[in-house]
Amino acid sequence: MSIEKQDLRAVLHKIEQERELVRVKRSVDPLIEIPAVVKALARLPKIPALLFESVKRYPGVRACGAFFGDRSRVLRSLDLPMEPIALNSYIVEALEKPLAPRLVTNAPCKENVRKSPVDLGKIIFPTKGASQSKHLYYHTVVFTKHPRTGRINMGMYRVTLQPRGKVTVNLRVTQHGGMHLQVAKEINVPLQVALCLGVHPSIYEAATSELPYGYDEVGLAGALVREPVEMVKAETVDMLVPAHAEVVVEGEIRPPYKLGNEGPWPEYLGYLGMNINPPLMDVTAITFRNNPVVPIFVPGAIPNVVSIGNEAQLLRTLRSFAGEFVVDAAFTHGARRHHAVVKVRKTHPHHEGYQLNVAMAAFGHGSSTALDQVTIVDEDIDIRNYREVDWAVSTRCNFSKQVHILPEARSHQNNPIAGVRELSEEPIITGKMIVDATIPWAYRVAEKSPGITFFTRSSWPEVDLGTYLQPEDKKRWLK
Ligand SMILES: Cc1cc2nc3c(=O)[nH]c(=O)nc-3n(C[C@H](O)[C@H](O)[C@H](O)COP(=O)(O)O)c2cc1C
C-alpha cells in the first residue's frame, strides 16, 4: 500500500515538498472569510493550495482550500498523464478496468467515533460559500446504497446543516444518488448514506465524473492510481467507507422522507443556485481523524479541476458505437459540461451524416443532463483551442443546413436559461443544439483546380528559422 495513493494528508505533504502548499497561520472564519481568501487566489498566475491551520471556533480542525485550483498539481498528485489526449486514453483504460476496493479493519477515519445524538456543526465547521448564502454547507462525497441491489453509488453532492441535528443532502432525481432515493421511496425503506469529507483526490475525481448508472466509481478511483481504495465498515449503516477519509458522517434518509430548505449556493458557472428543498437525513454517527483536514470548495471562484473522467467517458460512449470514426472529445473552458466538441474522421462518402448520429449519442453520455450543445469538427482541428473551433464553425458550417436545433430536453438547473423555469415549477428543460462544422463530403472533394479543393489549406515548405538569424537574434526570438 502506498500512503500517497490513499490519504489526502500524504498528498498535501507531497505538494508541500513541491512548494505548492501555502500554510495560513492566522486564525480565519470558515463561513465567508475562507471562501473570500480562496477567491482572492484567482488573481495569481498560478494558484497554490492553502492549508488553514487555525479555524475560528473549531480548535484542532484544519481547512484546505484550492487544492483543485491547478491542473498540473492535480494530475501530478495522481501521477496521471499531463497531455489531454494521453490523459483521456489513460482514463478510458481505467474506466474499462475498475479495481475492487480492499477491506481493512484498522482505519484512520475511526480515530474518533461519536454515535447519535451528534451535532455535526459543533464538530466540523461548515461554510457559507458566497456572501448571499443563507445556509451552512459542506461538500461531501456521498455514498448511497441501492435499496434493492445493494450497489453503491458515489457522487459529490452538497449538504447543509438543519435544525435538530439533521442535514439536507442535495440528491436530485436525475442524479444517481437521487435515483437510489426514488427506489427507497417506492418500497418505503430508509436510504442508507455515508457522507465523506477529506478523501484522496482520486476519490473526488471519480465521484464528480459523470459515469453510467451502476458504474463502480470506487473501482475507478482505485484504477486511476493503480491501487485499490482501502475501505472499512461503517459504524451504523451497512456500508463501506474510505478508511483514510478525514471525516465520515453516517445516516439515513427515512420515511416519510421530509424535505429541508437551502440556497442560494455559488455554482460552478458563476451564478448563484436556487433556493431548493432537498431531502433530510438523520445523522446516526460521525467518525473523524485527529486534527481533521476539511477541504472547502468555492465553485465559480477559481478553476476547479474535477470531473476529469467526463471527457474520457464521453469518448468511451461515442467510440462504443462509432469506433475510430470518433477521434477525440472535449468540453469547452467556458461552458464546461454544457458544451462538448467532438472530433471525427470522415474518410468515406458513407461517413456523411454519421457525425450527426455521434452528436446525438453524446447527449446520452454518462449521467449528464447538462450537455446542451455539441459542436462536431474534422480531424485537423485542435478541439482544445477555441480559436480553431471558432474558425471551423465559421468556415465549414452552412448555418441554415448544418445547425440542428433539437427539441427541448432535461438540462441542468445550474444553466440559468433552463434553471429559471424551476421557479415557476416548469420542467428544467432547454433546446439542445448540434453545430456540424465538418466539411460536407460533396464539398470536401470538389476541386477548384486539379488537386486543390475549396478547403485545401495554404502550405509552405518547412525551414529552419535559426539558420536565417544572427546568434543574438536567435537567442532573443527563438525559444
Ligand atoms: C464542488 C462540487 C459540488 C457538487 N455539488 C453537487 C450537488 O450538490 N448536487 C448534484 O447533483 N451534483 C453536484 N455536483 C456534481 C456531481 O458531483 C456530479 O454530477 C457527479 O457525477 C454526480 O454523481 P452521479 O453521476 O453518481 O449522480 C457537484 C460537483 C462538485 C465538483
Image (tube, rainbow, N blue to C red):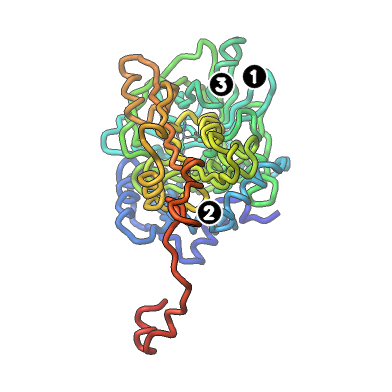
Q: Is residue 466 left or right of residue 365?
A: left
Q: Which residue is mark 2?
A: 84
Q: Residues within 10 Å of mark 1 (few under 14, many from 20)?
A: many
Residue on which disc 1 sits: 147
Q: Position of residue 235 (x, y in %)?
A: 64, 31
Write down the residue under mark 3.
179
N-term mark: 1 or 3: 1
Compute the Cα span from label 1 to label 2: 38 Å
Query: What's the amino acid at mark 2?
Result: Pro
Q: Residue at x 69, y 44 (%)?
A: 106
Q: CA distance from mark 3 to mark 2?
A: 32 Å
Mark 1, mark 3: which one is toward the viewer? 3
The x and y percentages for residue 411 are 43, 26
SS for tag 2?
helix
In the rendered image, the residue lying farthest to the left is 132
Disc 3: residue Cβ within 8 A of ligand 1's nearest atom: yes
Quadrant location of the C terminus in the rendered image: bottom left
Rendering quarter of residue 53: bottom left
What residue is shown at x 54% (from left), y 37% (from top)?
Answer: 352
Cα separation, mark 1 vs mark 3, equals: 10 Å
Query: Identity of the amino acid at label 1?
Result: Pro
Instruction: Please identify the quadrant where the N terminus is shown.
Output: bottom right
Secondary structure of residue under mark 1: loop
